[in-house]
Structures are given as structure tokens and as C-alpha cells.
Image (cartoon, helix red, strand yellow):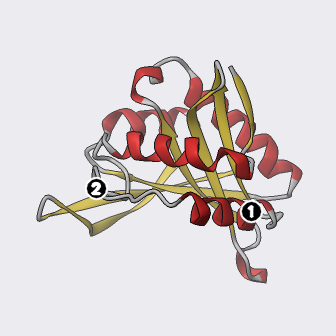
Amino acid sequence: MKIREIQPSDAKAFSHLCQEIDESGFMLYDPGERMIDIEKEEKRIKRILGDDRSTILVVEENEQLIGYMIAIGGSVKRTRHSAYLVLGVSKKHRGKGIAKQLFEEMFRWAKEREFTRLELTVIKDNENAFLLYRKMGFIIEGEKVHSLMIDGNPVNEYYLYKLI
């Protein structure tokens, strides 16, 4: 298993991984909602790689992408110290410590760039992810009420942060 920064050549594999992870029902996209457009994905990856305050780390095993963590850093002076994180791990690879390793690598990346705050959101009912985030040192900052509509029902998210 290897953790590395994404490359534009990963666009197709990354798109398929995101679609697979969307099937969990705990991501922003509904299952089946994300459309794959390799050209657009390549451009998005290049844009993120061109921003020294953002990155996508991927986990590769046997030449397959099995997980990722995205960091989108603040772009204005008042938010340059913070980054918003998104995590996804393939269903068959969950529970093996991959997310923990991604967090540890992301923490190193963030410290090198002098970030002092990391933040993320989690659907309130996603207990496994919530417990992982707490284990990694994230603290509940608040609850986003009716922040998402899932199957026609309003769903709340927790907003979490970690100071580094």
C-alpha cells in the first residue's frame, strides 16, 4: 500500500473510486448521481495540484486506487490557515487503518504548509466515520441542521475541527 499525491493520469481511476464510495450513502453525491467526465476530472486535478494550499492524497494498492483524502485550503488571507477535508475509502478496504494513515499523512502535509486548522463535516448518522474523526482528534464545533436532503428527508451533519 502506498500513499501519494494524485496525478492527472489518475483521473479515470479516481472518478470510478469516487462513484464506488458514493454508494455508501454517506457522501455529498447520492449513489449513482456522480457522472464521470475524465477530461473535467483531469482539469480539476491539475487545478488542485496547481494550488499549494490544496491537495488530493490517494492510496494505491496493487496498482488500484482504494482511498483518498482531499484538502481544500483557504484562499484568502483570513482563511489561509485552514483546510477543509474530504475522506473516502473503498468499502472492501475499510477497517484496515487506511483512513488513519491518510490522516497522518495529511497532518504532515498540513504542518509543512503551516496550516493550523483542519475541518470536515460528517452526516450525523455515520457513526463509524464520526468515531474515526474523534479518534483522530477532531472536535465537534456544531451541528448543521437540515444541511442535506437524503431520500427526501432532511439530514443533519456535524461540523468538526482539529487544531494542529
Vertical side of 50 occupied by 5: above or below = above
- Count of numbered labels shown in the rendering: 2
Tell whether 55 sits left or right of 17. Answer: right
Q: Which residue is mark 2?
A: 30
Tell whether 40 sits left or right of 156. Answer: right
Q: Residues within 10 Å of mark 1 (few under 14, many from 20)?
A: some
Residue type, numbered disc 1: Lys
Query: Which disc number belongs to residue 27?
Result: none
Q: Which residue is mark 1?
A: 46
Percent position (x, y) of residue 46? 74, 62
Q: Nearer the viewer, residue 64 or 164?
A: 64
Query: Which marked residue is nearer to the observer: mark 1 or mark 2?
Result: 1
Tell whether 100 sits left or right of 113. Answer: left
Q: Residues within 10 Å of mark 2 (few under 14, many from 20)?
A: some
Quarter of the rendering containing residue 62: top right
* Furthest residue toward left: 152
